[in-house]
Image (cartoon, rainbow, N blue to C red):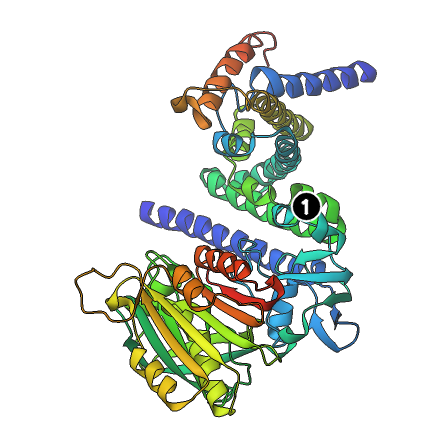
Amino acid sequence: MVVGGILVSVGISVGFLLGTGLILALLLILAEKKILNYGTCCIDINEGERKIEVKGGGSLLSSLGENNIFIPSACGGRGACAYCKVQVIEGGSMIGPVEEPYLGTEERKKQIRLSCQVKVRSDIKIRVPKELLSVRKFKGKLLHKRPLTYDIVELRIELIEPKTIDFVAGQYVQLESEEYDEHDRVMRAYSMASPPSDKNHVELMIRKVPNGICTTWVFEHLKEGQEVVFSGPHGKFHLSNTDAEIIFIAGGSGMAPIWGILRDMKEKGNTRKATYFFGALTRRDLFFVDKLTKLQEEVSWFKFVPALSNEPAESDWKGERGLITNVVASYMPDCSKSEGYLCGSPGMIDACIKVLTKAGMTEDRIFYDKFV
Amino acid sequence: MEQLQNMKFFVSLVLIFTSAAFTDNILLARFLGMCSCLAISKRVDTSIGLGGAVMFVTASTTALNYLMYNYVLIPLGIEYLRLIIFIVIIAAFVQLLEMIIERFSEKLYYALGIFLPLITVNCAILGIALFMLNKPYTFWQAFAFGAGGGCGWFLAITLIGGIREKIKESELPKGLEGPAITLIIIGIMSLAFVGFSGMIKI
């Protein structure tokens, strides 16, 4: 009898809890359907260049993503990276507290917004750089991952969906890491080292960054045969349309876009003169020397200059020694008619810009890709 | 006669409100809702934002929880479930409120929007709903108690925010920076609020 009473009261309380929970959950779901229903909204991109219809209520970034327009974003829409800036001409919501700190006065005047924080609640007009409309999301399979030096690996990825990529040599892709340990997915930019003619493969060179979320994933978790996801092509780093002599300067994984450009030049029967200064600390940081030397022998227009800054004096290294900036200065006393293409850390790029401008190169002829 | 009754009723509401706001200040006398207070009270404007949101939510959820307790839980004989039910009701109410605000007032949404999720887990609100049960209040008295408690929290966090804004420029010993000095400020302020105690007894 007593047991029966306890059972009844337990039954009542459990039933009541479940009932209340269910009713409240239903109420919330209904409310979300009713209250947060904005109907279909139209996103007009670049004054009618493209018009897409989306279900209202989502963020601009995700609504565009669903329609295969990928605005660069590293944090996945949490308002932490500020990469996803677009110009919202009409129909954007107010600037919220999350994006407040990322927008300067100039940007506010131009109506620049973080697309992950703008909610699509009505018809909206935006302007994005033209090349973003050709950016797509790719799925591929890692064919191989092989070490180039002790801290740089080369990835070769076969494209699965879509099967081909069109890009200009020198551009980069945004590689998406998978979740591991306590890290979320992140997107990081890596230049393509493969020539554009190899349409169904992409090659990347990735240097290990200590504690880097994406590079640690690449080095320790990514395995051959695994599926990889990236978006691209991005970036404006590519050869100009002139006949000026080219000076490439890059060290480490900065070789990636230049290796792509060089192979592209060879395939297209280029005749522009080009010199590639490869700066490294010691011999263990060098790679592809054989391939670049071979290219130098094959074509008349190319010259390869590797230089080591920290190589012990007693070693049998016969190439150049010293800081890459000094080597460039001694090889190229007059750069007034050349163009510079630089790739590497911000510090190295700034130092090289100084040397090149001192040798007579104007800043508008210096192109660079800073690896932050 | 009826007028006198009305008068008495009104006075009791005012008394409950002021006692909940001052003598029984939920933040300074009961030390509830401390975590969000420490996190948000760096500036006066955010303090006012969160304080206002808390005030509104306490007043409404105390009333809701009063109805729930007296007309559902007591008849069913399951008063002991009040803690869970109150939490669920507060959470659902805040969610619903957030949706409504988002839909109808963009300005208010951005002013309160980031604070609303914080409120769901604010123990001051649950505390006020539970303290309300200690006294034999009528519905409107419970409402006044909730509004007063929220108002007290609003007042306290705004004052703390003002003080923290003033001392931002001052040089503090390293160990006292941030939450440490805030806790000391709260301690001194609660001493001041102790002065109110005994003024009103209900």
Q: Which residue is drawn at 57% across and 60% down?
A: A83
Q: Closer to the camera, B165 or B191? A: B165
Whether residue B52 appears in this view of the structure is: yes
- The residue at which mark 1 appears reads as B110
Q: Measured from the top left, where is residue B109 in percent x and y?
A: 69, 46
Quadrant where the N terminus of chain B is found in the figure:
top right
Tell which subunit mark 1 falls on. B
- The quarter of the image holding the C terminus of chain B is top right
Nearest the eye: B16 or A92: A92
| Residue visible at 46% across and 75% down in the picture | A257
**Residue A169: x %, y % from top left:** 51, 80
Front position in the image: A60 or B126:
A60
Q: Can residue A192 be seen in this view?
A: no
Residue A93, horizontal then vertical, whole percent: 73, 55
Left-right relation of B131 to A52: left
Amino acid type for the residue under numbered disc 1: Tyr
Q: In this view, does B134 lie above or below A17?
A: above
Against B181, is B90 above or below?
below
Q: Is residue B188 left or right of residue B153?
A: left
